[in-house]
Image: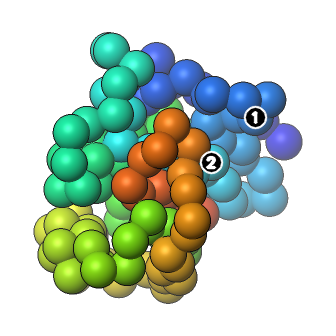
Amino acid sequence: MEILYTDKAPEAIGPYSQAIEAGGLVFLSGQLGIIPDTGALAHSLAAQTVQALENVSCVLKAANLTLKDVVKTTCYLKNMEDFALFNEIYGQYFGDHKPARSCFAVAQLPKDGLVEIEVVAEKKA
């Protein structure tokens, strides 16, 4: 097992790692729409979704991976009424690559975020 870290994504806000590589898979902890340089959340659902996906991309890059290597995502929204806008932005990032996905509305996210995205990616030999 290897702990992965990049300073291009937000620091973990608790006792966990940004990502762990194990058994040919890379497990990313959930990424909020936190701007790494400031530690603040982006200002809107759209901006937080973009930032969360950028953070995911940066952590994947630390493992020499891209969004094309993602096999599963789990997405958490504060409000399911935001699903259409979230889905539109998510689709722009993943394009024709369509990993398996779950998406849930939750009562509250850390830092009162509006969206959180976690992924599992495959590290090919």
Residue sitting at 80 percent across and 59 percent down? 23
Q: Is residue 79 above or below residue 20?
A: below
Residue sitting at 25 percent across and 37 percent down? 42
| Quarter of the figure with residue 99 | bottom left
Q: Which mark is residue 16?
A: 1
* Crowd rating for badge 1 (residues with CA inside 10 Å; few <14, some 14–19, many 20+): few
Q: Is residue 74 above or below residue 113?
A: below
The Cα–Cα distance between marks 2 and 1, rounded to whole angstroms, is 8 Å
Foreground pick, 50 / 110: 110
Q: Position of residue 103 (x, y in %)?
A: 48, 79
Residue sitting at 18 percent across and 67 percent down? 89
* Crowd rating for badge 2 (residues with CA inside 10 Å; few <14, some 14–19, many 20+): some
Q: Which residue occupies the extreme front position in the image?
A: 107
Foreground pick, 72 / 42: 42
Look at the numbered discs 2 and 1 and tell me whether their residues touch, using CB distance below 8 Å: yes
Q: Position of residue 22 (x, y in %)?
A: 78, 52
Residue sitting at 24 percent across and 56 percent down? 45
* Side (left or right) of 51 relative to 108: left
| Quarter of the figure with residue 95 | bottom left
| Quarter of the figure with residue 72 | bottom right
Q: Is residue 64 visible?
A: no
The amino acid pointed to by label 1 is Tyr
Disc 2 designates what residue? 29
Q: Is residue 20 visible?
A: yes
Q: Position of residue 121 (x, y in %)?
A: 55, 62
Q: Position of residue 24 (x, y in %)?
A: 71, 59
Q: Which quarter of the rendered picture does the C terminus lie within?
A: bottom right
The image's colour scheme reads rainbow
The amino acid pointed to by label 2 is Ser
Mark sitting earlier along the chain (2/1): 1
Badge 2 element: loop
